Amino acid sequence: MDPLLQRLLTKTHPLSAPVDYVLRLAKGQLHLPPFRLRDVGPTDFEATGREFLGLFVKLANLQPNERVLDIGCGCGRIALPLTGYLSRAGSYTGMDITRKTIEWCQQNITRRYPNFQFVQADLFSQRYNPTGRYLAKNYTFPLADKQFDFIFLTSVFTHMLPEDVENYLREIARLLQESGRALMTYFLLNEAQQLLAEQSKNDINFQYGPGLYRLWNEVIPESAVAYEENFLIELIQKCGLEVSGPVYYGVWSGRNDGLSYQDILLVKRSPVGY
Ligand SMILES: C[S@@+](CC[C@H](N)C(=O)[O-])C[C@H]1O[C@@H](n2cnc3c(N)ncnc32)[C@H](O)[C@@H]1O
């Protein structure tokens, strides 16, 4: 996007709302969230939503009548295509820490699809909600145990620190029904990724941090966080879950056989129990 237009569209610019509206009108995108709420990088907004819906069906066998939880749902990039897939027997709950995105989803999605609900949690993130009052590491989702068939986090754990991720993994184990599945994306650090990093092929240079997890930006840690693969898999197990199937590596690290952009893990409840 043109840099001048990008400046006009920043949340604080006084002309941002009308410019955003005219631009969406011109592009035939009034059904989509305002550009200023689409804090999801430069990818094609609708194509990415469709891509993930396809992956949910292909990798996790998502069915139209299932109960779905989208943690870190943002402005509804994945919820929008799901409105065309989940039936009235199914349901969708979206949760995020940014109030404006949740308000847009409530006003524009829930109104038309009452089985799609959105909730905000005022949790701190230096990158996404710097005035947040509570900590993600202590957060209990206000949702009953074993309530969901499918839980997903797309590009969310890539913006969260280890103690917060650990708490969310325990919560996911609590919220999944016995045969439920969860799909989550990560930036994984491993030998193959390291070799590609040495050839400057990683898209993101995770240069800061202790090794088990590494950061792209030291000042705003949640800008992008990568996890050492074995550390993460052990953490998943410690939290009452287990990886189901292979790791689906993404192309972010420079691999040319990646399935998506980020690395994807599919997990289920561990039989030894939570
Ligand atoms: C790159 S966006 C991805 C949004 C959405 N999942 C998608 O794929 O379009 C990252 C999202 O994670 C959310 N997020 C960051 N920390 C979070 C936390 N602790 N709990 C829930 N959501 C969080 C942000 O507010 C933001 O909406």
Image: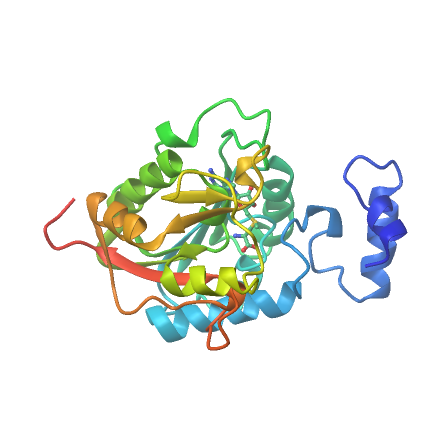
**Closest to the observer, 142 or 241:** 241
Q: How is the image coloured?
A: rainbow
Please tell me which residue is depicted at 86% across the width and 64% down the height of the picture: 26
**Above or below — where is 187 with respect to 215?**
below
Please tell me which residue is depicted at 39% across the width and 43% down the height of the picture: 211
Q: Quadrant of residue 187?
A: bottom left
Expressed as whole percent of the image width and height from the top left, the position of residue 155 reads 50, 53
Q: Residue furthest left?
A: 272
Please tell me which residue is depicted at 10% across the width and 51% down the height of the picture: 272
Expressed as whole percent of the image width and height from the top left, the position of residue 191 reads 37, 61
Please tell me which residue is depicted at 36% across the width and 44% down the height of the picture: 212
In-image side of 213 versus 202 (left or right) = left
**Above or below — where is 266 with respect to 74?**
below
**Above or below — where is 252 with respect to 162?**
below
Expressed as whole percent of the image width and height from the top left, the position of residue 154 reads 48, 56
Q: Quadrant of the C terminus?
A: top left
In-image side of 58 versus 36 (left or right) = left
**Above or below — where is 250 with respect to 16?**
below
In-image side of 255 versus 170 (left or right) = right
Residue 1 visible within the image:
yes
Residue 142 visible within the image:
no
Q: Quadrant of the N terminus?
A: bottom right
Q: Residue furthest top?
A: 133
**Closest to the observer, 18 or 240:** 240
Expressed as whole percent of the image width and height from the top left, the position of residue 257 reads 46, 77
Q: Residue furthest front?
A: 198
In-image side of 184 versus 76 (left or right) = left
